[in-house]
Image (tube, grey):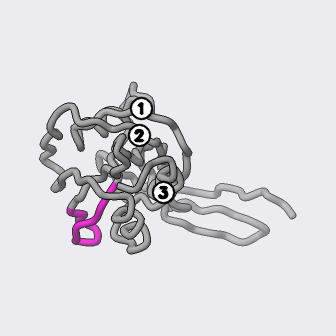
Amino acid sequence: MSDNVMPKSQREVYRDAFLAVKRKCFEYRGRDYAYFIKEEPEFAVCGAVTTEGQVLMVRQFRPGPERWLYDMPGGIIDDGDTPLDTARKELLEETGYKAELELLAICYVTAYSTAKKHIFLARNCRKVTEPEEDPNIIGEPVLLSKGEFLAMVASGELLDLDCALLLARHLEEYPDS
């Protein structure tokens, strides 16, 4: 079996500060394939847990689904920053907490996006300040017990499921909160 997928053409159909959409065409085994690809920046997220075993998340209004969902602290990696810098900065800005950070995984967001997600475990989170106000985000930090968090993972009322599943695996280290 041949792995030779040949690019044929591409054209940009949309662009703003955070997203470009391109129509890309490929040829494989004499057949043409066309896809719309989102070109997006890399970002970092934190599965965050306090020393008491509470899970730290951000409850945010998300305009796509037009509803409140729970999310992991995180954001786009700015030029000059490392994924670790971004994870540390976003955790502090969105929640007011600092933590010990460990990289757990790097993955693509979807098959139709160029974005990579850097997933960190934030251990021993401790509050050091109030979260920053962001004019583009409607949200607030929340603390959940281990049981509440695991129920939320099962419910689908959250984003960053991949990060949540990795965090759930590490919650065994903590007593029930």
Give how far across and how far down residue 126 sits, in percent.
Answer: 28, 36
Report the residue that reaches farthest toward the right: 1
| Labels 1 and 3 touching (C-beta < 8 A) | no
Give SS at disc 1: strand
In the figure, 21 relative to 121: above or below?
Answer: below
Give how far across and how far down residue 100 sits, in percent.
Answer: 41, 32
Dot 1 surroundings within 10 Å: few (below 14), some, or many (20 or more)?
few
In the figure, 55 relative to 33: above or below?
Answer: above
Give SS at disc 3: helix
Report the residue that reaches farthest toward the front: 175
Q: Relative to 152, is 127 on the left or the right?
A: left
Q: Relative to 134, is 145 on the left or the right?
A: right
Say which amino acid is labelled 1: Glu
| Labels 2 and 1 touching (C-beta < 8 A) | yes
In terms of sequence position, does the residue under pointer 2 or pointer 1 come before the other?
A: 1
Give how far across and how far down residue 170 sits, in percent.
Answer: 51, 50
Residue picked out by circle 3:
168
Q: Which residues are magenta?
A: 61-71
Q: Is residue 170 visible?
A: yes
Q: Which mark is residue 122?
A: 2
In the figure, 81 relative to 43: above or below?
Answer: above
Image quarter (top left, top right, bottom left or bottom right) of the N terminus: bottom right
Say which amino acid is labelled 3: Ala
Residue picked out by circle 1:
100
